[in-house]
Image (cartoon, rainbow, N blue to C red):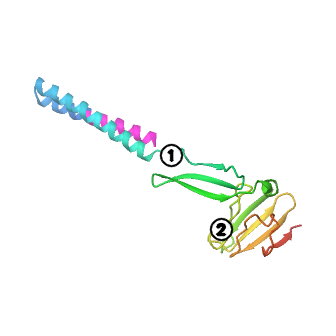
């Protein structure tokens, strides 16, 4: 973005300089002075316009996340439509080590796979259907254990939280 702004500024200044020279040769000395004043004013106006555009399009560095004092949730701060927003999500630090070895993939209807692995300790709240897929597969990198989540079952903590009724199918690949 900065390169684009710089090129635009240089081209604008060159264009205004050429126009001022054209006017300078057609008018007398008094008119040249006024032409130069107009050129300086136009350059300052252009630079101010470019600065305003750059300020509006600059990314906002306030996007961040933090673990709350309770150690049971995480707050994500992000900017949307120029306004700062807050999103809170459950967080289980006790499951971080267990979840770290898992890679999670969304499988689409035409069997393409996309990795959707999240920060360990955060639950997978969306179902495969909500993400536009047919199933979610979690693969343990160390044991090759695979957990399949059908399209309408959210993976949550990958069943590692020992919840009942999670309807998981666990398989081991050889």
* Front one among 149 and 172: 149
Q: In which quarter of the image is the C terminus?
A: bottom right
Q: x and y percent of residue 62 in the render? A: 54, 46
The answer to whether 106 is drawn above or below residue 93 in the figure is: below
Q: Can residue 6 be seen in this view?
A: yes
Q: Is residue 100 visible?
A: no
- Image position of 150 (left or right of 55): right
| Residue visible at 40% across and 37% down in the picture | 6
* Front one among 136 and 166: 166
- Image position of 88 (left or right of 41): right
State the extent of the magenta-drawn residues as a range.
Answer: 1-16
Residue assigned mark 1: 60
| Residue visible at 45% across and 55% down in the picture | 81
| Residue visible at 56% across and 55% down in the picture | 86
- Image position of 89 (left or right of 1): right
| Residue visible at 67% across and 66% down in the picture | 125
Secondary element at image label 2:
loop
Tell me where residue 162 sits by quadrant.
bottom right
The answer to whether 63 is drawn above or below residue 88 in the figure is: above
Label 2 neighbourhood size at 10 Å, few (<14), some (14-19), many (20+)? some
Mark before the other along the chain sequence, 1 or 2: 1
Residue assigned mark 2: 126
The answer to whether 122 is drawn above or below residue 107 in the figure is: above
């Amino acid at each position: 973005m900065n390169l684009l702004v710089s090129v635009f500024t240089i081209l604008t200044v060159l264009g205004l300089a050429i126009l001022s020279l054209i006017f300078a040769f057609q008018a007398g000395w008094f008119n040249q002075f006024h032409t130069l004043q107009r050129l300086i004013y136009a350059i300052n106006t252009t630079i101010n316009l470019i600065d305003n555009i750059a300020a509006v399009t600059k990314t906002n560095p306030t996007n961040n996340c933090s673990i709350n004092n309770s150690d049971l949730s995480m707050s994500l701060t992000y900017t949307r439509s120029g306004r700062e927003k807050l999103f809170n999500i459950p967080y289980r630090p006790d499951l971080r080590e267990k979840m770290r070895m898992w890679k999670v993939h969304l499988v689409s209807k035409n069997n393409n796979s996309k990795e959707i692995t999240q920060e360990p300790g955060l639950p997978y709240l969306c179902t495969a259907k909500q993400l536009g897929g047919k199933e979610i597969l979690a693969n343990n990198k160390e044991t090759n254990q695979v957990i399949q989540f059908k399209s309408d079952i959210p993976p949550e903590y990958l069943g590692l939280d020992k919840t009942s009724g999670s309807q998981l199918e666990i398989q081991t690949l050889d």
